[in-house]
Amino acid sequence: MTDFAFLSTHSFLKVPMGPQDPVDRPFGLAGIAWDGSVTNRPGARMAPRAIREASHMLCDGTHPLFDVSPADTLCDLGDLPLPNTSLERMRAAMQPQVATLLAQQRHMVWLGGDHSVTLPLLRAYHQHFGQPLGVLHFDAHCDTWEDHFGEPSGHGTWVYEAIQEGLVLPQAFAQIGIRSAGLRAAREYVRDQGGLIWTARDLRGLESPAQLDNVLQTLRLRWASCGNPPLYLSFDIDALDPAFAPGTGTPEPGGLTTNQALTLIEELAGERWVGMDCVEVAPPYDHAELSSNVAANLVWTYLCGQVAHRTRPA
């Protein structure tokens, strides 16, 4: 399971590869090279390697807003060894590995892979914290379908499953960038459960902190009203318009700009984040490595924000 050619051989930001003392390096990164649940174009299994390579352009990794680098507090734990043919076997093999890393009190970032990997991640986080999580979900697609083209689970069902399983607090679940075709029951599922949705259309023309202040304040107030639960960030790269991230399996025109995404991640850095995933980058369809570069930048920005605010798992 560890000898596939697409698995990563270089680390993110050239930080130490392999387990390190979590006291010295409390932030960790791992790849989940799985794309067995895509519904259009495969290739996301190659993303962890491509994102890591793209991160090398960030040089010393010092962020111009936060004025910190995660390089001294981050270790790269490589790609999780997983079966690559069965969704259930992959999830069964993945969850205990995730639990082990969380038990080390590491603040983890996960490089997918397709979006089906988020469900076992949330299962592990729910078990670790002993309570439902709040989630900020960037995506073109609502991922709330009750089945996956006749199969019980896939990359388009994880939100529905997470809510049904009680892994997340519906009132603390927010979606940003939704715009794909879909029946109302799926499109509005999160809102119907008490959560929040900002479609890509809702956010057109809003990029700066001042322009996005209503979104930022609404999220903060909502999370506070829910008791400030541990927060998880799941970023599907297709939340961005294909002009910014063409390398993805299911591109949807009319998406977010990179500026919008970065503003939201930067401004919310001080909230109670406990982990992040970045999924659905598909290098075979990328142009000029745009998608891998923006994914590396989003992950780097998130990490720098957490280092700046010294966010650690409770």
Image (spheres, grey):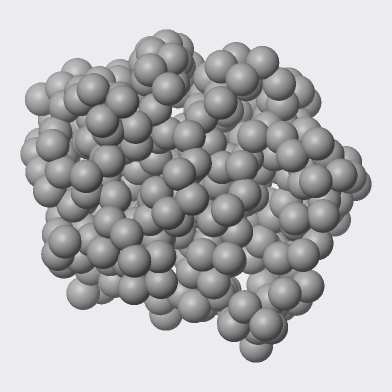
Residue at position x 86%, y 44% from top? 225
In this rendering, the answer to whether 303 lies above or below 162 is below
Residue 49 position within the rendered picture, expressed as x and y whole percent measured from the top left: 19, 46
Residue at position x 58%, y 53% from top? 270
Residue 247 position within the rendered picture, expressed as x and y whole percent measured from the top left: 34, 64
Q: In this view of the protein, which residue sits in the foreground, 135 or 285?
A: 135
Whether residue 277 appears in this view of the structure is: yes
Residue at position x 49%, y 41% from top? 311
In this rendering, the answer to whether 57 lies above or below 137 is below
In this rendering, the answer to whether 139 lies above or below 107 is below
Q: Is residue 125 left or right of residue 302?
A: right
* Quadrant including the N terminus: top left
In this rendering, the answer to whether 26 lies above or below 56 is above
Residue at position x 49%, y 78% from top? 259
The part of the image, by quadrant, that contains residue 92 is: top left
Q: In this view of the protein, which residue sits in the foreground, 108 or 1?
A: 108
